[in-house]
Amino acid sequence: MRIKLYLCIILVILLMSPMQGVSAAQSAEVTNDTVSFNFPETATFSATLTANAEITSVTLEYGSKQQTCGDVIARAFPGFAPGKNVDVEWTWDMRQSGSLMPGSSIWWRWRYEDQTGAEYAGDTQNATWLDEQHNWQTITSDFLRLHWYDLNQATAEDLLEAGEESLARNEEQAGLKPDEPIDIYIYASYGDVQDAVLYEPSWMGGQADSESSIVIVGLSQYDHKYDRDVVIHELTHVLVGRFMFSCLSDVPSWIEEGLAVYSEGELDADSQIQLDQAIKANQLLSVRSLSSGFSEEFSKATLSYSESYSLVKFLIETYGQDQMTALLSELRDGNAIDDALVTVYGFDVEGLEDAWRDAIGAAPRPVSAQPTAQPTPTFVPTIVPVSGAPLAITPTPYVIPTSSFNSPDSPPSQTQPGGPPLALTIALVGFCCVLGLIFGVIIIGVIVRSQNRSGGTHDKL
């Protein structure tokens, strides 16, 4: 009988537990859960939160969907008046955090807790970060979604076709394929595209974000071929970025920009003339210098793009597409450019430049007989070891020496030949004085303490 009673109690508990869980879940309500945009500056999230007891804390989790090295969750803590029903609002200011690409997918969810300790999580919501002033239209293909406004259908379809050409060329030339659909936003003018992104240069006419698989392009209004080339160029950046994505990779500029220009086809006439003149005058930029960002000087920047194109063309047309794909894979795995080139082609950056110069009929790479120039010494603060750092001494700036020996033109030293430096001698004398003072205080303390003990024992007797 007692066993039956226990079984009945257990059955009642099991039946009531899920009902209680459902009740708790139903009491958590997030209503009026919206986001409003003041594009391109702010996104304001708002909602009404409800709980069975007074709500004591609220957290907004938010972010944008993109490739990352790890889970990235931003959190905001909006102010509110405690109660069972609270209205909350928080604004994401792009002027402080940096602008998102138009077309980015924003996500958010509300989490809150009441005074009983119960925790609630709202559903994850999504919205597209995009200006609403334009009447956007969309056409698609297998891996491309092209969005436009103020443009005739035929021109939009032609730009989509240019995108398809970019995908085909990049697969053929470098083995690059899209791993997800890519969105292309076509703005009617350079002014419109610049207004859609904060803190971009005034000459910006197109941009690619491989982490979000988004391309934005402003139309030139006068050169449709150029507009097609921009679509092809920027799509290549997305493909390279997606293929190369890792927390270790470092792609030299000449490879990424070279692939982008090479995917457009042959160099335009002006760029080819500039490259030919640089070859003839022996004024080519070194390949090593093209590994980081290009010069801001216009003529050097355009030559950098042309040389990068020529380098990539040389590698692909001499050694084949498989080798280029292998080079990108080596860099994606975190290998330095010299090591990657040696592994795939058998030469480093300087070896590449020698072979490339020979192939295009340029003069041999200049080799200086002087050692590599070192940077000019600069004043830096000294670094005091953590242990034993003097509390009242401020680090003093000094010049980093370029050698162990004084140069003929250096000022006379403050030290005597064979003797210790004057500053070191003074420091040692000061240290000895302090040490002696400490020992003296200790000895006096021992003597006084001994006398006190002696007097105390006599009293007890």
Image: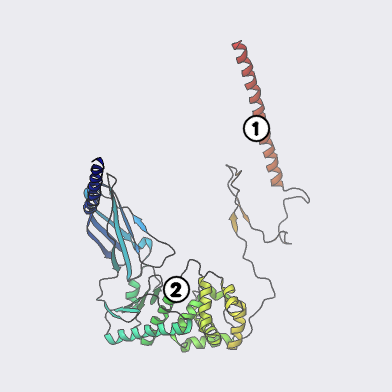
Say whether marks 2 and 1 touch (CB < 8 Å).
no
Badge 2: how crowded within 10 Å, few (<14), some, or many (20+)?
A: many
Return the residue nearer the eye: 425 or 448. 448
State left or right for residue 83 relative to residue 227. Answer: left
Return the residue nearer the eye: 262 or 122. 122
Q: Name the residue under label 1.
A: 438
Instruction: Please identify the residue farthest to the top as the structure is shown.
Output: 461
Q: Is residue 15 above or below residue 322?
A: above
Kindly state the secondary structure of the residue where label 1 is placed.
helix
Q: In which quarter of the image is residue 405?
A: bottom right
Residue at 49 percent across and 74 percent down: it is 296
**Can see residue 254?**
no
Return the residue nearer the eye: 324 or 293. 324
Q: In this view, does 62 lie above or below 438?
A: below
The amino acid type found where label 2 is placed reads Gly
Kindly state the secondary structure of the residue where label 2 is placed.
helix
Labels in figure, total: 2
Picture coordinates of residue 163 (x, y %)? 37, 82
Q: Is residue 437 above or below residue 30?
A: above
- Which circle's residue, 2 or 1, is located before the other in the chain? 2
State left or right for residue 26 relative to residue 202. Answer: left
Return the residue nearer the eye: 150 or 325. 325
State left or right for residue 96 relative to residue 430. Answer: left
Q: Name the residue under label 2.
A: 241
Q: Quadrant of the C terminus?
A: top right
The amino acid type found where label 1 is placed reads Ile
